[in-house]
Amino acid sequence: MSTQIETLIEEWERAKLGAQDYLDAMPEEGYGLKPAPESLSFAGQFLHLGHANYMFAAVACNAVSPLKDEAAEKNEALQSKAACTAYTLASYDFVMESIKAMDPATLGEEVAFFRWTIPRKVVLDKATEHQVHHRGQAAVYLRLQGIKPPGERLF
């Protein structure tokens, strides 16, 4: 039977594969696609997701994020397929490395997270919810390009 940390790692490995499926499915020319002017681009969705992964993991796991405060989705150097993919997948690695370094006994500890005080495990749950939300939005971008979105990798 898996420990709680092992289970979290397994779920994040699966989530990383799901993100990679989406990143691989979109051709380079679709990375700048915006379904509406006020929307993030396809790259922007994943860069935002990745940036948030670092932030969530830093809080949940008491890890030191290597990022500066600049929003990744605004960084011109990250807009290409290769750069966006590398950045996004590295964010999943950071989450998993941070979880592996945790003492499982701290998962129930409460931490400040924006205006809430919630257990570290709940911060990780919110990270999962956030990345699924943005990956789900990316399905529309793929459909607008005539591409069937990858399967959900639920298990």
Image: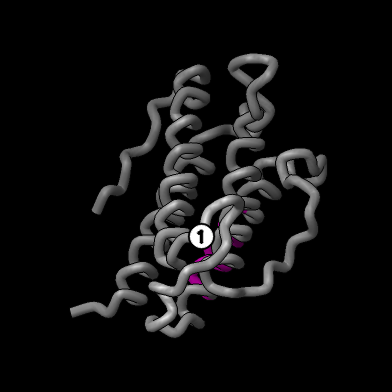
Question: Of helix, strand and loop, which mostly describes the magenta segment?
Answer: helix
Residue 143 vs 52, above or below: the answer is: above
Residue in the picture at 71% in, 40% down? 73
Spot occupied by residue 112 in the image (x, y as percentages of width and height): 57, 62
Find the residue positioned furthest to the left: 1
Q: Front-most of 113 and 47?
A: 113
Residue in the picture at 65% in, 44% down? 47
The residue beneath circle 1 is: 117
Spot occupied by residue 137 in the image (x, y as percentages of width and height): 48, 30
Spot occupied by residue 3 in the image (x, y as percentages of width and height): 27, 79
Q: Front-most of 153 and 2?
A: 2
Residue 33 vs 46, above or below: the answer is: above
Residue 141 as seen in the image, left or right of residue 54: left
Q: Front-most of 14 and 127?
A: 127
The number of discs equals 1
Residue 135 vs 125, above or below: the answer is: above
Label 1 crowding class (10 Å Cα cut-off): few <14, some 14-19, many 20+?
A: few
Residue in the picture at 35% in, 61% down? 11
For the C terminus, give its image quadrant: bottom left
Spot occupied by residue 66 in the image (x, y as percentages of width and height): 73, 67
* Amino acid marked by disc 1: Thr
Does residue 54 belong to the magenta stretch? no
Residue 88 as seen in the image, left or right of residue 150: right
Magenta residues (range):
88-97
Quarter occupied by residue 44: top right
For the N terminus, give its image quadrant: bottom left
Determine the secondary structure under disc 1: strand
